[in-house]
Structures are given as structure tokens and as C-alpha cells.
Image (cartoon, rainbow, N blue to C red):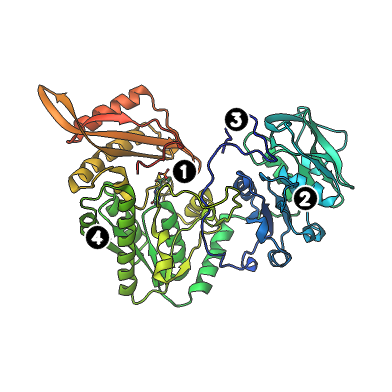
Amino acid sequence: MSLPAGPPVHGPCAQPPCPRRPLAKRPPCRYPAQMIQHDRLLIIDFGSQVTQLIARRLRELGVYCEIHPYQKVTDAFLTDFAPKAIIFSGGPASVFAEGAPMPPKSVFDLGVPILGICYGQQVMMHCLGGKVERGHGTAEFGRAFVTPTTDRLALLEGWFDQGREQVWMSHGDHVSEIAPGFKVYGTSPNAPFAITADPARRFFAVQFHPEVHHTPKGAELYGNFVRLAGFRGDWTMGAYREEAVARIRAQVGSERVICGLSGGVDSSVAAVLIHEAIGDQLTCVFVDHGLLRQDEAGQVVAMFRDHYKMPLIHADESGLFLAALEGVSDPEVKRRTIGRLFIEVFEKHARSVGGARFLAQGTLYPDVIESVSFSGGPSVTIKSHHNVGGLPERMGMTLVEPLRELFKDEVRALGRELGLPPGFIGRHPFPGPGLAIRCPGEVTREKLAILRQADAVFIDQIRRHGLYDEIWQAFVALLPVKTVGVMGDGRTYDYACALRAVTSVDGMTADYYPFSHEFLGETATRIINEVRGINRVTYDITSKPPGTIEWE
Ligand code: XMP
């Protein structure tokens, strides 16, 4: 993730202007910490926008870590979690504020290495006897250069070979006096305590954010930290696969499980993993709601039933869904209608496989993390997202979520480990409500047929030009408007469509993909020539925000 440069922002840990993921209301993790067979690193979240990036950097180093909000980290939690090292994230609060976010005092007596970042540094100094001063207009936001002092520090192995290192600062308050036992190991023009440490206690505190892209040597710093904490880097997908299989067997016993298969990466990887664990106790349910892309149903059935030999119910419920969508043009009503019918269809099939008690789904770690929100109040609902993940509460089934510790790219790595074809693993995301939300206005069979063909041509173009893997997601939206054109000697009066292609890291923010004019022209010509019903093609160049990726 690259952070947008912006004007100085005042505040203890100034935040880049990007939206945060709405707080996911999830049940607590079902797996006791002891079931994770790896050394664990605890990230205490004080509310930074980039806390998840710390976890990404650590996972890339083969270190198992979990993010927990500071309010959850009690003495009992620390005993249960038994971290081998701890990181304090940044955060927007001030240590001077009433009820300022703090860790329990006992955290400093555990004898494990601690790394404090930005607000985390201020927390360490505040708790251990140093001094923090209010910003008062001295906020620092953006690139800075840190130079070393004369003392050497294992945390900085590989740093300063060119004399100074670029870092990314984002803070208002700052440390004005370090705590007893600490020394300074790096300074910047505005940050005399940029890097501080008490090597004897293995406490480290930095004023900048090593997890962001703009601190190029940040990964080395984290690598040094976990090495000196004694991590073995044993968090590999091979190891995870074995543990997950054992865990699924222990959870499910001899009961039956159904898995909602959408054909997307997450549910596919979950299904293959669970099938490896419990074989034909698993039945996959693939609901064809009539809103799928061209040839999609055939591909999913061929892959799972024919190739993986999994019990698979291909529920063709297109009649049910399309009838319910007749006359509906409000995006939220569409989404809710589709969500409700999904539940009904699932319940029907859960009964038909002899009363499955477990429902498997591909929930990922970003959906589970309960990050700290300082925004106050619930987030505004932009769209009622749904996929099979919206089902369980109302169905009264127990969840099997074997991917809930993983980030998306780890799921892809696990998919490769399980032998899923690369083309399948790299597929663009496809939303649960399918083409219904790419067809603003009323959804009809005629419009869906036109949309499917145009979408297939666009994706074919992208593949022919070797661009598929550079793009996060690409699709066509069929606009609810007809325009006049001329083909041959005749007048046409057909639909207009919009091409949408975006780059993104996680779907939370996105930029339009900068196709060449030649590519766009060629694609427009192909769509108009090959798809009856479309006579005008536009390219949507809206970023997210302010747009969203899907049109509805
Ligand atoms: P938006 O349109 O909100 O989409 O910018 C962000 C990402 O989420 C996908 N999306 C969905 N996925 N169920 C899903 O499983 C949904 O209801 C849903 N709505 C949007 C979208 O395709 C993009 O990748």
C-alpha cells in the first residue's frame, strides 16, 4: 500500500486521508491461541490506519502474528496468548488525552522484546518514565531522513550503509525526553528521538512507520526485530495446510459440512482444504442465480465435480432469482433480494444433504480483525455487501472458517500449495450479487445476455494484451440508457456500456487502469461489432473513493 502524500495533519499520529474498513462485527476467534502451533507475535492496535500493514510485513517474514485492539489486551489475555514479542502500533490519540489508549502495565514485565511505533513510541516513553510533548504546530507528516548516532543497534542491521535512510513520519506529539535505560540510535532534523532503544530489555521505539512503503528499509527493521526475538520464520503455507487439516477434523468429527462455493478464490481454496480434511463429508453448493458470467457455471462444475471429484450440488435457481428481481431497480433492494434468496436456497440444500450442522466459508483475516475505531459511531453503509458470508447467523449452523487467519495473498499461496491451477487462483474478484449490480436499473434476461457477451469480449481483450494479472478487477457495466448510432447505412438505437478496470491492493481504494487509447479503441470496436445490442462504449475513469468499484 502506498500512502498518499498530503498536507501536514495535526494530531499525535496524523492519518493519511484514506477511508477505513468498516468495523466487522465478528464473533471472537474460535481457536484458542494454543491451537496455533507457531511462535506468536502480538500487535497491540492503537488505531493506526496502517496497523494491518505491520501484520503483512511480519507474515512475509514467516512470522505468525495477530492484531488485537488495546482494550482487549488484559493481563489474562497476555497469559493466554503468550506472545514471543509485542509491537505497539501507531494511533491518532494523544497520551495526554483523558482515557488515552494504553497497554496493561504488565506488558513491560513479560521479558519479551517490544517495538513501539509512533504513538507506540510515545506510549512506551510515557509508561517507562520519559516525557512526551504536545505537537503545537510541529506536526511532521511525510518523508524524512534519519541519520545514525555513533552507537550500533542490532535492530538496525543493514541500515545506514549509504549514511542515512528515508523513513515516513506521521505524528503531532513527540518524545522530548527518553525513559531511563533508553539511548538514541537515530535522529532526523525534526525528530531527535527518531530511533531509541533499551537493548538490555530489548525495548525499541521509533517515531516513524517502518511498515509503509515510504520507509524502504522498513522490512529489514522488522526482520531484525523478529530475529532478535528468536522467531524461526516457520509460518509457511505447507505448515499451515497440515495444521488446518488437523483442526478441521477435530472440529467437525463425523458430521456433515456444506460449503457455499462461488467459484471465487476464497471459497474455492476453503473447499479444497476442507475436502482434503474430511473427504465426502463435505458437500459444496454452487448456487447459479442466473447472474453469473459467460461459461462460469460450467467452469466451476468442471473444476470441482469433475477434477476434484467433490460432491457438488449445482443449484440452478436462476428462475427463482430473476423472477424476484423483476421490476426491481433500486440497488439496495436488489442486494437484499438476492441475499434473502441465497439463504433460502442454502437452507434447502443443507436439509437435502441429511442435515449438515456445519457451514464452511472462506472468511479472511481482514474481515475478522477488530481494529480500533476512533471515528465514533457506526460506519455509514455504502452497500449491503453480501456473499455466502452473510448467511450463518440466521441459519443457526456452526461455522468452519479455515482461512480466518490468512490475508488474501496467503490464501492464494495456500491455493498454489493445494495445487489449484494458477489461472483459477489469479481470478479477479466477483461479487456475490453478480451481474445484477453491473446492470443499473431493472435486470432482465435480455440485458444479462448482452452484458455477458460484452464482458467476455473485454476480458478476452485484456488477456490477449497480457494485462489480466496487472488489473485487480475488470468488467463491463450495461447502462440503462439507449443511444443513437449508425452502422453501415442504418440507424441503431441500442444500449451504451461502460468498461471498468481498476488497480487496487485490497479493494478498499482503487485507481482506474491506464489503458492505451489503442487498446480502448480496439476494444470498443470489437464490442460494437461482436455484441448485438450495444452501440456505444465508454471507459469509467473514476477512482475509489469517490466512486466504488462496482456500479451499484
Ligand atoms: P465496491 O463496489 O464496494 O467493491 O468498491 C469492493 C470489492 O468488493 C466486491 N463486492 C462484493 N463482493 N459481495 C461480495 O462478495 C458483495 O455484495 C460485493 N459487492 C462488491 C467488488 O466486486 C470489489 O471487488
Q: Is mark 3 within 8 Å of ligand 1?
A: no
The picture quadrant where one finds residue 488 is: top left
Foreground residue among 490 and 177: 177
Residue 95 located left or right of residue 491? right
- First in sequence, mark 1 or 3: give its number: 3
Residue 203 seen from this side: no
Position of the C terminus, as image quadrant, is: top left
Amino acid at the residue labelled 2: Leu
| Residue receiving disc 3 | 5
Of labels 4 and 2, the one closer to you: 4
Position of the N terminus, as image quadrant, is: top right
Of labels 2 and 1, the one closer to you: 1
Amino acid at the residue labelled 4: Asp
Foreground residue among 221 and 143: 143
The alpha-carbon separation of the residues under discs 1 and 4 comes to 29 Å
Of labels 3 and 4, the one closer to you: 3
| Residue receiving disc 1 | 507
| Residue receiving disc 2 | 228
Q: Secondary structure at mark 4?
A: strand
> Is 47 drawn above or below residue 345 in the view shown?
above
Say which residue appears at 35% left-offset and 41% top-offset: 551
- First in sequence, mark 4 or 2: give its number: 2
| Residue receiving disc 4 | 316
Residue 461 located left or right of residue 184? left
